[in-house]
Image (spheres, rainbow, N blue to C red):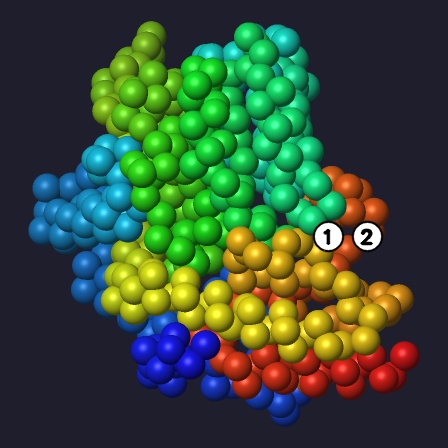
Amino acid sequence: MVNAQSKYDIQTIRNDFPILGTEVYGKPLVYLDNGATTQKPRQVVEAMVQQYYTANANVHRGVHHLSMIATDMLEQSREAVRRFIDAESVQEIVFTRGTTEAINLVASTFCQQEMQAGDEVIISTMEHHSNIVPWQLQKERKGIVVKVIPMADNGILCMDEYEKLFTSRTKLVSVAHVSNVLGTINPVADIIRIAHSHGVPVLIDGAQSVPHMPVSVRSLDADFYCFSGHKVYGPTGIGVLYGKREWLDRLPPYQGGGEMIGTVSFESTTFNAIPYKFEAGTPNYVDATGLAAALEYVEKIGMNNIAVYEADLTQYALQQMSQIEGIRFFGPMEQRGSVISFLVGNIHHLDMGTLLDRIGIAVRTGHHCAEPLMHRLGIEGTLRASFGLYNTYDEVDALVAGIHRVSQMF
Ligand code: PLP
């Protein structure tokens, strides 16, 4: 703990995030809802403001100076993403609205082209709704079958059972890298290797991994990988779908419109090359600039340093919280990310969350968009504290003191 803390200049980092110095109900804000969204450093906001003030024009469409600058900036942002997730080519980086849109893009285009009624997709027990519902929509539309990897009581996927789910009809596996509820870090390299041994491609939902650990899509050999900008200290409304070139070339367009075309007549249309084939309409180019600034920001701190710091902070939090009477944790104690889901005695999660809020502590309550997981755990919801790169040991202490205080009121 001391090592990670001393290498890590937490105060300088916190100074980059103006919101962390604010108060709620007259109490200093303790923001522990980073799994939902992260706060933004000045560097991100300023990069976007700068572009609006000095380099705003529609991209790819103009011969004029500003349009060329804006186009260059968009393509530099694509390169920043490529570097960050270690993709081979910028052609493999599609900008989307976020993880949800990326998964919908794959579900829709992959099912349209690669799946017939009765073909199967494998997901897991701990998926976010955004990696469940798009497949169910395809179940309704196309008659595909959705199979689910079971989970043990300790929040770990049953890998033996996973292997048994493959049949000659299995066409795709789609799982989260890190659970947004349990914090479980899934063995995605093994999940991918096993799927590939059956000739099946894999989509990884990286919404909760990319902000917290180094990710190399090439080392993982992922076929598709997606994440959201707003969870990695970037702006809302932008995210990324990585797809291996051969898959993106093969899949049909998702939406039709400007930018994604080659030529158009009233009779027919040819499509642009990847990644533009999947980016219909004016892209969210200013948010792409913000996302690139965010990725540069975390790269400067170092993804390994962030991972070590957050792991130590989470271990400290688990230790301190485990002394609270009646506390129940959900998820593994090791091999975990910086998300802690818990309940205390029979205090309703909403009551506890509301009272913590009154003392300035922002945590999430409810089913966390993972209702099937709640059913598996036999609960309605949990409290969830999720840490980011700027959270401190003092904030963990404030959370623990807050839970004690609220518990005594019941
Ligand atoms: N997948 C996981 C694991 C998540 O935690 C979330 C958001 O909480 C999503 C997908 C959806 O992300 P977004 O709402 O940014 O599209």
Q: Residue at x 51, y 22 (%)?
A: 172
Residue 183 versus residue 71 in the image, above or below? below
Name the residue furthest bottom: 26
Which quadrant holds the N terminus? Answer: bottom left
Residue ID for mark 2: 380
Q: State the quadrant of the C terminus.
A: bottom right
- Residue 356 placement (x, y as % from top left): 72, 78
* Residue 304 is at least partly visible in this image: yes
Is the residue 363 above or below the residue 168 in the image? below
Residue 65 sits above or below residue 406 on the image: above
Question: Closest to the observer: 324 or 86?
Answer: 324
Q: Is mark 2 within 8 Å of ligand 1?
A: no
Q: Amino acid at mark 2?
A: Glu
What is the spatial separation of the Cα atoms under label 1 and label 2, in whole angstroms? 6 Å
- The image shows residue 25 at horizontal and vertical percentages of 66, 87
Q: Nearer the viewer, residue 128 or 283?
A: 128
x, y percent for residue 345: 86, 68
Q: In the depicted view, which residue is nearer to us: 365 or 55?
A: 365
**Which amino acid does the dot numbered 1 rest on?**
His
The residue at 19%/64% (across/down) is: 54
Q: Which residue in the structure is indicated by mark 1?
A: 367
Can residue 52 be seen? no
Mark 1 / mark 2, whichever is N-terminal: 1
**Residue 201 vs residue 335, the one in the foreground:** 335
Residue 255 location in percent, x, y? 42, 27
192 to the left or right of 281: right
Circle 2 Cα neighbour tier, 10 Å, few/some/many (<14 / 14–19 / ≥20): few
Label 2, secondary structure: give it.
loop
